[in-house]
Image (tube, rainbow, N blue to C red):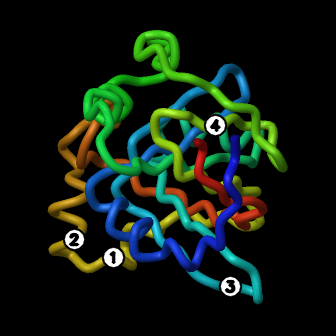
Amino acid sequence: MKRKIDVFEYAKDITTAISKGILITTKANKINAMTIGWGSLGIEWGLPIFTAYVRTGRFTAEQLQKNPEFTINIPVGDFNKKILGVCGSKSGRDIDKIKELNLTLVEGSQVSVPAIKELPLTLECKVIYRQTQVLSEIPADIQNSCYPQDVPSTFPMANKDVHIVFYGQIVDAYILE
């Protein structure tokens, strides 16, 4: 069952969870979930927006170019932290994370991408704008810590790839019960 929520009534829960890790789920070649720790919730163009930051070399970025829809999946209460670990360290190019973790998919209401029952607070989003970061516009100290040029794109954490910022209009929000 999907219990509809006002996303801004859950803003503190959502923004607190981001820095600990949440999932962005995509569906193009296959369904894939990736852990993200950067994102924001707000209003732009008078619309509720979730901005997700995805490195250019990630499988998730490829998926979003093919199908510009995603879900954000946020833990509520106790959950298996292995989900965030696997989804943050393995590529969907190489493995089927949904199958490996035995995740339960729930069909989206407004998007083609499913929600994940194990992380039940769900935002369904449609990409309405994207922007690739310009490395030269980022302060040197942040470039050095977040975009070290001597670290290959395949490294799961800080590496040389900048992020694409995907602005997702939140078209539905609910908690799976």
Please say whether residue 155 is visible from this viewpoint. Answer: no
Residue 142 in percent (x, y) is at 22, 71
The amino acid beneath tag 3 is Glu
Please tell me how crowded label 3 is: few (under 14), some (14-19), or many (20+) other residues with Cα within 10 Å: few
Which residue corresponds to the image point at 58% horizontal and 42% vertical from the top-left?
Answer: 177
Query: Which one is in front, 151 or 175?
Result: 175
Residue 59 in percent (x, y) is at 53, 31
Q: Secondary structure at mark 2?
A: helix
Q: Quadrant of residue 176?
A: top right
Spatial separation of the CA atoms under disc 1 and disc 4: 28 Å
Pointer 2 or 3: first along the chain: 3
List the residue tagged with mark 3: 44
Spatial separation of the CA atoms under disc 1 and disc 3: 22 Å
Q: Is residue 77 left or right of residue 4?
A: left
Please say whether residue 124 is visible from this viewpoint. Answer: yes
Disc marking residue 138: 1
Q: Is residue 26 left or right of residue 53?
A: right
